[in-house]
């Protein structure tokens, strides 16, 4: 059964995550992928999420895709208890996931029931296609990306940072442009999308 916790700002909903998991996190290991943040100037959320996980008793095993070997990618994604992908540039993230083959392993692990945690870009990347993210992220950072087909683990489209600075206007554009054709799930920084098999719900703090 697929289990996903999709957020805009993980540190703001960390307590909600603990309620969702409903198991002792002490000593469990999380594969922590900060790759999406590489092209970004603002990256504070990476450290914030790391601290939030450590506070829960989790062992944070960082996996920076642009630096990792294939065997590291395979072993960390398959052997660790949970998978987390940070915010940043969704298009850059997609290119690196494809380039390294991490995309296929993550999909496989989610299908096997491993809990996936996404934050912002990490939440949007599991949708069927990320073309809708152009209103929020600069797609020109990866000019040779080609198709925008993403991980396609969920059949809807998360929109993080709804009503939150500095993304409020971009979010409104995304909603007005795509609401008639895509199943959009806008969430603010204090909300999360909880996926438990076929059960999908938005929870607020």
Image (cartoon, rainbow, N blue to C red):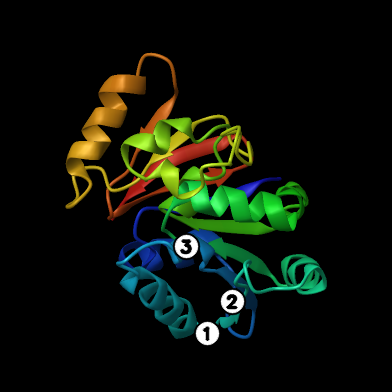
Sequence-first disc among 1 and 3: 1
Task: Return the disc, 2 or 3, that comes first in the chain's sequence.
Answer: 2
Image coordinates for residue 13, horizontal then vertical, percent: 35, 62
The 10 Å Cα crowd at callout 2, few under 14, some 14 to 19, many 20 or more, is: few
Query: Visible in this render: residue 102?
Result: no
SS type, badge 2: loop
Specify the label residue 45 is tagged with: none
Q: Which residue is drawn at the image coordinates 74% and 68% (left, top)?
A: 73
Specify the quadrant that holds the N terminus: top right
Give the residue drawn at x 41%, y 58%: 88
Question: How far is disc 2 from disc 1 in space, using C-alphas?
Answer: 9 Å
Q: In the image shown, does 169 or 21 lie closer to the viewer? A: 169
- Residue at the extreme top of the image, as rendered: 180
In this image, 174 relative to 85: left or right?
A: left
Measure the alpha-carbon separation of dots 2 and 3: 23 Å
Q: Which residue position is annotated with label 2?
A: 24
Q: Are marks 2 and 1 in contact (CB under 8 Å)?
A: yes
Disc 2 or 1, which lies upstream in sequence?
2
Q: Residue at x 70, y 53 (%)?
A: 99
> Distance from label 1 to label 3 (Cα)?
19 Å
Q: Residues within 10 Å of mark 1 (few under 14, many from 20)?
A: some
Q: Position of residue 133 (x, y in %)?
A: 40, 37
Say which quadrant the C terminus sits in: bottom left
> Residue 27 at x, y = what percent?
63, 85
- Would residue 8 be found to the left or right of residue 81 on screen? left
Q: Which residue is mark 3?
A: 86
Q: Could you say whether the residue bearing mark 3 is in a helix, strand or loop?
A: loop
Which residue in the structure is indicated by mark 1? 57
> Which of 198 and 103 lies nearest the eye of the viewer?
103
Q: Residue at x 55, y 32 (%)?
A: 129
């Amino acid at each position: 059964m697929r289990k996903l916790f999709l957020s805009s700002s993980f540190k703001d909903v960390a307590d909600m995550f603990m309620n969702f998991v409903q198991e002792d996190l002490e000593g469990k290991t999380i594969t922590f992928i900060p790759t999406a943040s590489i092209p970004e100037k603002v990256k504070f959320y990476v450290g914030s999420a790391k601290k939030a996980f450590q506070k829960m008793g989790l062992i944070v095993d960082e996996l920076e895709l642009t630096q990792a070997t294939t065997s590291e990618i395979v072993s960390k994604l398959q052997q660790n208890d949970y998978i987390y992908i940070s915010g940043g540039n969704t298009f850059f993230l997609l290119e690196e996931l494809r380039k390294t083959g991490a995309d296929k392993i993550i999909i496989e692990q989610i299908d096997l029931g491993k809990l996936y945690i996404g934050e912002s870009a990490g939440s949007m990347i599991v949708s069927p296609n990320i073309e809708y993210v152009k209103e929020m992220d600069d797609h020109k950072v990866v000019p040779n990306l080609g198709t925008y087909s993403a991980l396609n683990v969920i059949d809807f489209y998360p929109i993080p940072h709804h009503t939150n600075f500095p993304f409020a206007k971009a979010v409104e554009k995304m909603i007005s442009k795509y609401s008639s054709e895509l199943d959009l799930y806008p969430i603010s920084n204090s909300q999360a999308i909880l996926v438990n098999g076929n059960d999908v719900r938005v929870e607020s703090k």
